Amino acid sequence: MNTIIHCAANHRSSIMAAKKLIYPAADRNKDPILSVLREYIQHGSNQIFLEIASGSGQHIAHFAPHFPHITFYPSEYERRLLESIAAHANGFANIKHPLRVDITTDFRTWGNGIFKESSIDYMYNANMMHISPYECSIGLFQNAGKLLKDNGYLFTYGPYAIDGKITPESNVNFNKSLKIQDSSWGLRDLQDLRELAQENGIKLLDIVDMPANNKTIIWKKISNEK
């Protein structure tokens, strides 16, 4: 009997493992990004962390055990990735089932209205803005402006242009390759994003240089307190 149970458990584990996608870049950058999050994530109960465009699910599964006091909500637009996210999140009590989210839509349509205005402490988005139309960046900041609590944080990660310039040459070539794939893709200029953030009650707080010519940008919801 025990052998049967053991074999069944191994079979389930094999199926779960088969659904997991592993992106080498996500494995390389998860610790550097975690080190930035540690600087800003605070202690306290009943905190919520919403990840937009969770991809394979590797990041959220890496972050969650380091912040047991936080409830993590992964999300993704591509249906094919939802299984991978669920597989990576399997076994973590503080990670919710992944939601399918179209960031260009209003948050009230997500997950049957699961999120309320000014209810989220942290939002996180990695490597989406440059491989999606600019409407996705607009939607990210519009929804963050509504969802984040006063003084809540938005963390974004990826390569960016600064004042119209892209450096180094590897990022220039990367930007060209993105635009060949889709003319609506490409590295976003930090000044454009700063203006977009300000329109939605969010300010740029800090820029942290990361490996492989990427940056983690910390944005903060402006408090309404006088």
Image: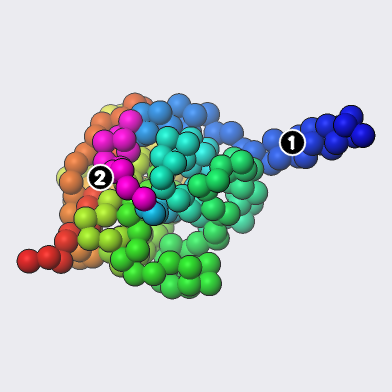
* Quadrant of res 152: bottom left
In depth, the one of 22 and 177 nearer the eye is 22
Left or right of residue 129: residue 90: right
Name the side, left or right, on which 46 lies relative to 192: right
Q: Residue at 53% across / 67% down in the picture?
A: 111
Residue 103 x %, y %: 43, 62
Helix, strand or loop at mark 1: helix
User: In the figure, residue 107 lies in which quadrant?
Assistant: bottom left
Q: Looking at the image, can residue 2 be seen?
A: yes
Q: Percent x, y for residue 10?
A: 79, 33
Task: Write the residue at 20% across / 63% down.
Answer: 201
Q: Quadrant of residue 216?
A: top left
The amino acid sitting under disc 1 is Ser
Examine the rendered structure and indicate whether residue 202 appears above or below residue 28: below
Which residue range is magenta in the image?
35-45
Sequence order check: which comes first, mark 1 or mark 2?
Answer: 1
Residue that carries the numbered disc 1 in the rendered image: 13
Q: In which quadrant of the rendered image does the C terminus lie?
A: bottom left
What residue is pinned by disc 2? Answer: 218
Mark 1: give few (<14), some (14-19) or many (20+) Cα within 10 Å: few
Above or below: residue 161 compared with residue 220: above
The answer to whether residue 160 is seen in the rendering is no
Residue type at mark 2 is: Ile
Q: Gap in Å between the C-alphas at discs 1 and 2?
A: 37 Å
161 lies left or right of 61: left
Q: Is residue 112 above or below residue 47?
A: below
Query: Any magenta on residue 52?
Result: no
Estimate the x, y position of residue 134 in percent, counting from the top left: 36, 58
